[in-house]
Image (tube, rainbow, N blue to C red):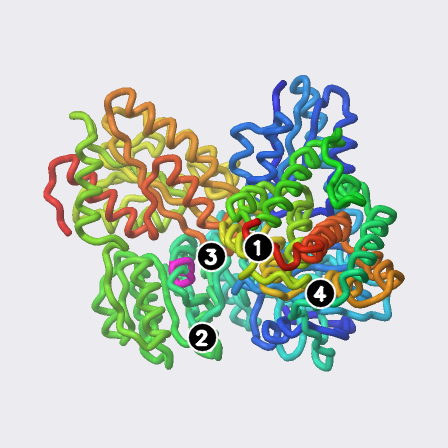
Amino acid sequence: MRPGEGEAPLIASEVSRRTVAVTSRSGVGRVHSVFRRCFNVVQPSSEWLTVGLAPFPRTPDGIIVTCTRAVDFKAEGLVPGAAVCCASGFLSVPQAGLRIRLRAARIFDTRRTPLEFSGARRRVARNLVTAWKTLDDRGRQEGLGWARAVLRPSDDGTSPGGCDYPDDLCRRAVPAIMALRIGIRSNDAAAMQRQVETLLGLGVGLTPSGDDVLGGLAAGLFLGGVPETRNSFVSVLREVLRQEGRTTEFSAHALRCIVDGEIPEIIHNVARDIGEREESDVERAMATLLSYGSTSGTEIALGLCLGVGLAAEPGRGRLIGRGI
Amino acid sequence: MPIEYLLRRNEYHDSIYLMRVAQQMGKSPGVRRVALVMGTPANKALLKDMELLGDEAASAGPNDLLIAVSADDDVAHAAARTAVGQLLSEKHTAVAGTRECRSLEAARALMPGVNLAVISLPGAYATAEAVKALNHGLNVFMFSDDIPTAEEVMLKRLAEEKGRLMMGPGCGLTYLHQTAIGLASKVLPGPIGLVAASGSGLQETMVLIDRAGSGVSQAIGAGGRDLRDEVGGLTTLQALDLLEADPETTVIVLISKPPGLRTAQVVLERIRSCKKPVVVNFIGGAFEPILAAGAQCASTFEEAADRAVALARGERYQPRAFHMTETEVQSLVARERAGYSAGQRFLRGIFCGGTLAEEAMMVMQPWLPVIHSNTAIQPENALADARFSLAHAIVDIGTEEFTTGRPHAAIDPTPRLERFATEAADPTVAIILLDFLLGYGCHPNPAGIMAKPISQAIDAARTAGRRLTVVASLCGTEHDPQRASVQRQQLIEAGALVLPSNAQAARLAGMIAAASSGRNHLT
């Protein structure tokens, strides 16, 4: 079957650095999962591609498509398991008659370096309050969204704790997140591993709620300038991710990208704005992150605020990871 | 409160939607609690908290949607099942835009680029549809097998005339442009092209090529009768032309039961003139004509795969009997043999893959010269009634006497479950040999279905003072929906010995059986 006969191809406006390498090799993958505005593809080599309709976040494996007609990937006949071909500058799903032209797309890069928070402690503290408030005001209540009120630090830096949980997911996850925060502060690898194992794969959806929180937390610590040599959280997470079958394949891959410093733009921008910009910028960046996915945006934001907060705690920036 | 589980493999929905489905199901009369989660260990722990975890949830993997329902009674469970089916499929059909057509013409109008028709109909209708498809310029993959030979020849000649491929009748699988069709596994792309008149033989060879780290360009199923003299190898010859011309293919593998004499001459002559190296496995056929045609000859699917991979890499083929050392094999044989009671001496094989059953019998011949079967190599060893085993026996439960009116055994495990229970309860049986076919179209969890019966049978034998050895091989890859490693783990946990190929499994089972019945080992 020749791909996309009779159909005008969609045009990719932007592609990530990593997808250039994947799509430049002729080969065939499979549609893994399909949503209205994006679909995921897995290659036999275990590489992934995420095709999203603009506006779509710049993710490590992202291909962003602009189109002049209304497109709903679920209505395009895309089904999990359908063959996806990469050849001659096109990505195509013959079964669905879908073709995407990749040539001439702009290339973006999601490799990140830690941000410098140490010279702007007051700004970071103020912007973190704004980030938590935005999360509180605009975050979703479902999934682990409820937990933001419990995990948000009070004025004295502690969390309220002790409460009636609304459901079993929160009852299991929230104490684990609290214990994980303590484990990170004391750089207790065994404690961190216990909680990471509790959270990884916990919840519903393609990226379970626990994974989204862990991803946000890892990104927050990394971008907040806490290297693996000082705190072993990222190493612990990387190690647990090596254990097959703890979470969905897609989510494990997305988390591996984060622990390797490949962080989606919408997450990076929140951390950057907390460290470098004004409150209004933080609000905007947070709003963008919160609108991502269904509950994922809220849960990633929750983890990110916790991670950046840990990296920026007065005194903790230096002490974190020294076994205090 | 009884809990029921529904498993939807590799199915993803957004989280809010799943929560709403759970809420809606929870409102059904008699339903107490509902959870829809991915089957990760963390979520199983969550289900335990919710008092919704039971043994049946164990087979769910992290990429499976696991639905747990606690309800008052069967009526409430049935209502919940219907509700979840409707809720999840409503969404699917509402937004996925499934394309359904009632005729080939309508399908072609909807998808002008389509060039393959898959036909799986009762034989009486299949030929007519295949003629239509070929006349529309489509290649045909025909799963249906109840087709007279004369009609098969007519279809293959028509295909030749139209410059199209007629794969089948009775074609179990084919793998074109990295698309698994029929009961096929997903394998890595690579330089090896295959043509086969044997479904499970093709599958096993593809899988072993993938496991060896190489890959498949195209794998063309020709249908089980293609190399008989009545058909004359029409599809095989076309496929050899295609693979020779295919720039992605550097090595060709041909698999078939021993062909008819006239057909063998024609096919081997074609191989002699082929510009690419060819490996041939005529499953028990003579070696000399193959070698005389300049091809490499393989006696097992594993050898065919290994030879093809070596050729593709420009390396020398290294024969191997086992992935273990000789000492490990001997100690395994001694360990199993030591546990058998005085009356235990027979091996029983229950196979889903017909050609795998035949390969197993050939591999075991040095140790067990007489093996009874419903697909016996020697007619004198044929089972009078396939429902009853005799001494050492191998049963292919993919044959008509087991599948009439029901799906193939690779899809519906019921006949094998029943047969396994019978064989395991027989006090003269020491070893049971099983194959497991994975891939698109096969049962979603074949090892999971067998795991409990295997562990129960092993325990029951132990209680009765016997030892039951279950030897298994898995024909599938990590890229399959069932995941070979997940399937393997379930079998190992159930107590089975899992070998990396059908040939190795048969070899080990034969050695143990020979040892248990007092015959000398041949190694």
Q: Give the residue type at disc 3.
A: Ala
Q: Are marks 1 and 4 on the same chain?
A: yes
Query: Mark 2 touching mark 4, by CB under 8 A?
Result: no
Name the residue nearer the viewer: B377 or A63. Answer: A63
Could you say where residue B320 lies in the image, as x and y percent from the top left?
24, 60
Q: Nearer the viewer, mark 2 or mark 4?
A: 4
Density class for disc 3 (Cα within 10 Å; few <14, some 14-19, many ≥20) is few
**Circle 4 sits in a helix, a strand or a loop, which is it?**
helix
Name the residue nearer the viewer: B391 or B60. Answer: B60
In-image side of A155 versus B223 (left or right)? right
Could you say where residue B471 lies in the image, as x and y percent from the top left?
31, 41
Between the residue at mark 1 and the residue at mark 2, the CA separation in whole angstroms equals: 55 Å
Q: Which residue is mark 2?
A: B249
**Circle 3 sits in a helix, a strand or a loop, which is it?**
helix
Between the residue at mark 2 and the residue at mark 3, the CA separation in whole angstroms equals: 33 Å
Which range is magenta? Answer: B205-210
**Residue B277 versus residue B500 in the image, above or below:** below
Q: Which mark is residue A321?
A: 1
Q: Give the residue type at disc 2.
A: Thr
What is the chain identity of the residue bearing mark 3?
A: B
Q: Are marks 3 and 4 on the same chain?
A: no
Q: Give the residue type at disc 4.
A: Ser
Between the residue at mark 1 and the residue at mark 4, the CA separation in whole angstroms equals: 16 Å
Query: Mark 1 touching mark 3, by CB under 8 A?
Result: no
What is the chain identity of the residue bearing mark 2?
A: B
